[in-house]
Amino acid sequence: MKKDKLSWKEGLRLNGRAARLLWKNYPQVFISDALKEVFSTLIPFVNIWFSARIIGELAGARNRETLIYMILILLLANLLLSVLRAAFVRWNETALWVAYRSKETLFDEKLLSMDFATLDNSHTRDLFLKIKQNESWSDWGFPRMLRYAGSLVKAVIGICGTLALTWNLFLLQVPEGAGGLSVLNSPVVNIVMIALMFAAVILSPAISKKSMDYWTNYSEEARFGNRIFTFYTYYFGIYERRRALDARMYRQDIICRNNMEKGDMFGIKSPIAALARGPMGMLSAAADTVSRIFTGAVYLFVCIKAWAGAFGVGEVTQYISAITMLYGSLALFLRTVGEMQTNASFVKDILDFLDIPDDMYKGSLTVEKRNDCKYEVEFCNVSFRYPNTEEYALKNVSLRFRIGEKLAVVGENGSGKTTLIKLLCRLYDPTEGEIRLNGIDIRKYDYKEYMSVFSVVFQDFALFAFSLGQNVAATEQYDEIKVKKCLKEAGLEERITCMKSGLETYLYKDFDEEGVEISGGEAQKIAIARALYKNAGFLILDEPTAALDPVAEYEIYTKFGKIVGGRTAIYISHRLASCRFCDEIVVFDKGRICQRGSHENLLADTGGKYYALWNAQAQYYKSPAAAMLNAETSGIK
């Protein structure tokens, strides 16, 4: 698949903008790379010039003092330039390493700041993965941009330096007694030689770029192959241990190996390998052939002119080396410019990602700070469709959350329960209708302040490889007494006493060999403690006890009223028996509210959805733990 061709004007604009962005963040990379190439390029020029003088002296007067003087100057110049080059190489390597690592913050800041609706969009995720795969398989995008400054500086200095060393090659005349070789004095010969050089300089990089085009046009296939390789090697068996267990139990390594072989985009049987054996390889060889032919022509021209007496043997070394370097420098300049044009299409993907707009209105009203947590929220005829879908996830929902009460939201999968919470937390805005906080449309409030009203335990919550205290507080510094209180309320008090470093114990072993591995139930309790620590006006629990055993679940519910305190609590669950402690239950079906009321009232409606769901789960309420839970929760308020 070929990438869309960009005009040179558009390519220049994209490269210019990317260069300004990278310069703003990593100027030391460009400065160190340029200085490194300055001294790297000066070293061969010094060697060429002094070598020509030394050889000339050896072929002529052979003055010992002159030779010693020039050799010493050459050695000292090489020493000084090499030391400076080494210093700037070191600086550049360090700066590049820092830039390669920290450039991810450009993407992280964008991901963390963009609207959740945009982040949750498949187009955004695909574009981001495309950028990372481009970097992974061939460093396309910003990684290559970081190296172009040095290449251009090297090419420009090389061109200027070699012109200074070769300009008089075409001016020195062959003596009159050279016979037929006097034709070398003709301006036509010089023009032909110069034209040959420029033809080779233009032709070789152009052919090389044609060869590279096969590689860049292979980007879609390469990304796909890289995804397969990454999934079946890293994510399947190393980074996601839950997959590694099934891989061993069910010998999924066999199907993995087969899929990797089918998706091998770089092996000897792959399309790119066929291209390498065919047109891509032929073009690369042709580019190299043009270069060799030109080098041979240079040797022939310089040697014949020296043989005819235009200059001495020392100048032969100077002119041959300098013209070869001139050709290489011109070719490097054109090749770099051509590669920058090719890279511009990959840079465009990055800039398109960074330019993704935030369409959600953030608001400006200040949310009233209430110590009593008395916030009232109301859904007013709210309907919602997810982007790029026609079906409504919620339709005409009107619901008021009464201050200080506990509300359970139940229903089958896909009935709209989690969507209700996403709208309430303003991760999405309603398609129709409005949501009000204390009588005001939530879109008018400052977005971050509005988010502070809610403490949420999502169904797919995440903990991090930080200390236990930092996970609960979600901050680096925390109140130890408050953290312990929240963990106790969440039922994790005994587990803390077993941890060697207490609240400073790291979860998992990513950053600390003594980190602890926690079970799914323990992780869920930590997530609940985190929600309690925030102490927001609304406490939202989306399947908060799904990973807990019946006894642990029972412990949570028996003290749920104490945990919630005077806050408004919204509880989503599939386990209807665990909803009995709530003041009211709202039943969703196909995106609409079909029933609402207390557990007893809803169960009394034998034709209702709640009754059908209850009886479908009735067999699970017969265990001793469930019976205990049913008996106890029926009286919890």
Image: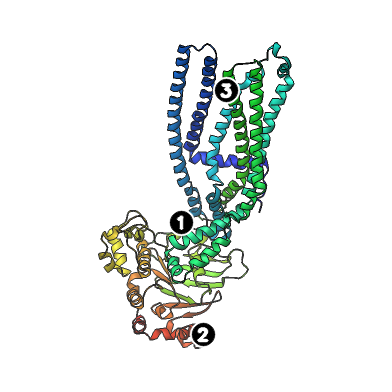
* Type of amino acid under label 1: Lys
Q: Nearer the viewer, mark 1 or mark 3?
A: 3
The location of residue 25, given as percent across then percent down, is 49, 41
**Upstream in sequence: badge 3 or badge 2:** 3
Label 2 vs 1, first from the N-terminus: 1
How many numbered marks are there? 3
Q: Residue at x 33, y 75 (%)?
A: 552
Q: Are marks 2 and 1 in contact (CB under 8 Å)?
A: no
Can residue 72 be seen from the camera position used here? Answer: yes
Pointer 2 residue: 608
State if disc 2 and disc 3 touch (CB < 8 Å).
no
Query: Residue 57: x, y in percent?
Result: 52, 14
Which residue occupies the foreground of this view, 216 or 101?
A: 216
- Residue occupying image coordinates x 44% and y 65%: 244
Say which mark, if any, is on residue 317.
Answer: 3
Query: What is the CA distance from the residue labelled 2 to the residue labelled 1?
Result: 40 Å
Q: Residues within 10 Å of mark 3 (few under 14, many from 20)?
A: many
Q: How is the image coloured?
A: rainbow
Instruction: Left or right? Give the position of 530 relative to 306.
Output: left
Task: Please tell me whether residue 420 is drawn above or below residue 513 in the rendered image.
Answer: below
Compared with residue 224, is residue 327 higher up or lower down, i.e. above or below?
Answer: above
Q: Amino acid at mark 2?
A: Gly
Q: Residues within 10 Å of mark 1 (few under 14, many from 20)?
A: few
Q: Is residue 423 visible?
A: no
- The amino acid beneath tag 3 is Thr
Residue at x 69% of width, y 32% of height: 199
- Helix or strand or loop: what does disc 2 sit on? loop
616 and 83: which one is in front? Answer: 83
**What x and y, as percent, mark residue 219?**
60, 52
Could you tell me residue 237's position as x and y percent?
A: 45, 62
First in residue order: circle 1 vs circle 3? 3
